[in-house]
Amino acid sequence: MAGSTNKTVHDIFQSMEYGPAAASSTATAQAWLDHHSRSLGLFIDGKFSHPTGRQSRALTGPKGENVCSTVCAVDDDVSQCASSSVSGYDAWSGLTCYQRAKVLLKLVSLLGQHGQCVSELCEACGVSCSPSTLIRLLQYYSSWAQLRDMIITNWTPLGVVAVVVSDDCSLYSLMLKVIPALAMGNSVIVVPGQNTAPPVLLLAQLFIGAGLPAGALNVLTGCDVSLGAKVAQSPSICHMTYSGNKQDGVTLCKATAGMGVSVTFSPFIGATCPFIIFESADIDSAVDGVIEAAFKKKREVNWVLCVQESVLDSVVARLRLRMAGMKCVGLDSDEDRAKVDAVILAAEQQGATLIQPSTGPPSGAQYPPTVLCWSAPSSPFVVNPSNGPLLPLLAFRSNTEAVTLGNHSPHGKAASIWTEDLTLALETAKSLSVGSVWLNSHSVVDPCLPVSGHKDSGTCTDGGQEGLYQFLRPSSSSSRPLPHSSPVSMDYSKFGTAASPPVLPDDLESAPKAYLQFVGGKVCKSVSGCSMAVRSPGGNSVLAYCPDGGRKDVRHAVEAAIKVQPGWMKKSPSARAQSLHSLAKGLEAKKQDLLASIKACTSLSTDEVEKEVELSISRLSDWAAYCDKVQGGALPMPQSGSALSYADALGVIGVVLPDKNPLLSMVTVLGAAVATGNAVILVPSRRFPLPALAFIQVLQASDLPAGLVNVITGSKDQLTAALANHSVIKAIWYWGSTEGCQYLQYTCTSPLKTLHLSCQNDDGEDGGKDWCQSSVMEEMWRKSVQWKSIWIPTA
């Protein structure tokens, strides 16, 4: 018909225009907003609360329209919410596993009924999350709620958990924290971002409708992420977990340091992820995949395209053809446009070539998709790409070079590998230091996949059974490892600088015995040449002198550890088990020396000392048996494909040992680190260092690689500061003062380190941990690994 505006399928494919939106009514979501007068209050104790005298925060949609406003909570609201959460925890945790699972399954039915409302509200707020993904989350974790006491034995819920996210965090990432926390029996306080607040409030209302006890799920909205710090001040908060961008996460960690709340951190927004195309890949599919990943409207990560040189020209040609008709991509603001222009100018000055569909508009928050060819790996826009539609392109020759480029980023969230060679794909996937690897695909998520943020991309595991343990504590722990307290006023730059006067070499002539420390497989003095006295339990006499180590000793130990750790990690579990069996035999051979060292520096009875030594020998043998028994494996997927999970080593771990059970605690944490492929730097108890120093003889006679285990004695605060400020150390396990815990929480955010902290009092009690219980092994094993998931699609 003449004048018809209808387009053929051929015309649409030529122009690559978006088709007209399907006709659908938004009355459901709009009616819900209108019911609340488009002013959403707080959700406390199972109902909406609209306190007076509060500031509000307006929310605009993707097209600039006014959606609603949210209330900014104040201290009184936080107190009321915390009190409600305690009551909610008592009611929710008091239910049986079956009853909790039944509530979550009923919510699945409610989401099916109100899925359109949830979907429309997410779309109005600019949050991409379909009800089907939420239903999948609920179905998966309702099963774990049912099986908790049957499979996850010897673990109990933490109590009240706070979930905090930044404004740019997705709804799925938020619910990936909330639902498993509820499934394990905790009550949850949610502090959502601005865009996720309305959908979360709607979901909270649906949770109550499904039978969740009042107070088990509360929602506090605020002006920014600082509201999370106010929530952490409540004595009832046991744990806080954060997702979003790193800047807000660092601010939150620093603000909560010293409050006695453990914090896990998932700063995945803006992470740099490699997209690797090998010559054996289906090039057409790979190019389609990279364009979809890099240039879609909303993305949480930044991609870097790595292409093998033999197919580089072919990939570039297909990119030019595929991008020819693409539209400009919207930016968040005009400021982002200026940043993108600056990146383009810097790239061209460095010799990069641009691939663009057309010239972008001269101004405004729009920019055409752009590939930056012939980029240098060290360029700032490659290491930390802009948030705009920019895709740096790097070339590599071999598999080894591809892995080097993939690991060049400080982030470790995910990677996409494209090749038809499965052996090459798996070899590359295992070598990349990332939490998720997708083979011939990208951005595939499912709650059954355990994913850890490697390097600067997180300190916790989300998804799968492994993701449940951040919301559980061992049943053997009688109290919180970090008791609630107010932050101590301290100068972080001076922590660890004040030390007691050391003993100089000339003063050691009259020493009963002078010990040496163990660094790089050799016994040695401290770099400073100074020593410190080890006194008897009453403090009346000097038993011995040991080195007073410092920052340079830690540096030498880390240099030795980082050389040997990759090779140790690659050894087979059976080879590591054999070395630990040998270490246990060596400990048994030096039994009398260790008995004497413990007896000399502690007030334990002979029977107690003998029991500790026997348990220590048995514990090392247990770790040897543990090496090849607990591993990852294949995971059942709800859609076409397979998935594998691996427990990777963290790297180099710094351990500041407790006073309690000085030998048994040391071999427990040492065995956990070494059995899982890590290297370790041990700082023995300042009060009872003699068992660790006597254990050096066992390490010397063992077949452990030189540098895998290092023992440094000295001032606890000084060595803690040295460990915290070393960029190579990936994790710190600390038993010490509240000031030391606060210092580590404040400092270990850049570079990001995984922390396991326990405050101990003057009597050496450390949060109720019983080192004699075998259940402590599983806890320390889980602290020693980070998880990686590999998705393998099938036709």
Image (spheres, rainbow, N blue to C red):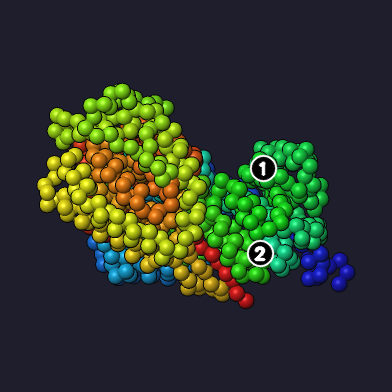
Residue 406: numbered disc:
none
Specify few, some or many for label 1: CA neighbours under 10 Å numbering under 14, 14-19, or 20 or more: few
Specify which label sits upstream in the sequence, 2 or 1. 1
> Looking at the picture, does residue 742 appear above or below residue 65?
above
Position of the C terminus by quadrant: bottom right
Q: What secondary structure is found at the residue carrying circle 1?
A: loop
Q: Tell whether 422 sits left or right of 84.
A: right
Task: Name the residue tied to disc 1.
Answer: 378
Q: In which quarter of the image is residue 629?
A: bottom left
Picture coordinates of residue 472, whole percent (x, y): 32, 56
Of the pair 337 and 151, the residue shown nearer to us = 151
Task: Name the residue tied to disc 2.
Answer: 418
Measuring 11% from the left and 47% from the top, which residue is drawn there? 605
Of the pair 773 and 541, the residue shown nearer to us = 541
Position of the N terminus by quadrant: bottom right
Specify few, some or many for label 2: CA neighbours under 10 Å numbering under 14, 14-19, or 20 or more: many
Measuring 49% from the left and 46% from the top, which residue is drawn there? 562
Measuring 66% from the left and 66% from the top, which residue is drawn there? 419
> Looking at the picture, does residue 247 appear above or below residue 35?
above
Measuring 25% from the left and 44% from the top, which residue is drawn there? 691
Picture coordinates of residue 383, whole percent (x, y): 63, 44
Residue 689 in sight in this render:
yes
Q: Tell whether 420 sits left or right of 654.
A: right
Q: Quadrant of residue 436?
A: bottom right
Tag 1: amino acid = Ser
Picture coordinates of residue 549, whole percent (x, y): 36, 33
Tag 2: amino acid = Trp
State the CA–CA distance, disc 2 to disc 1.
23 Å
Q: Tell whether 340 sits left or right of 484.
A: right
Residue 759 in sight in this render:
no
Q: What secondary structure is found at the residue carrying circle 2?
A: strand
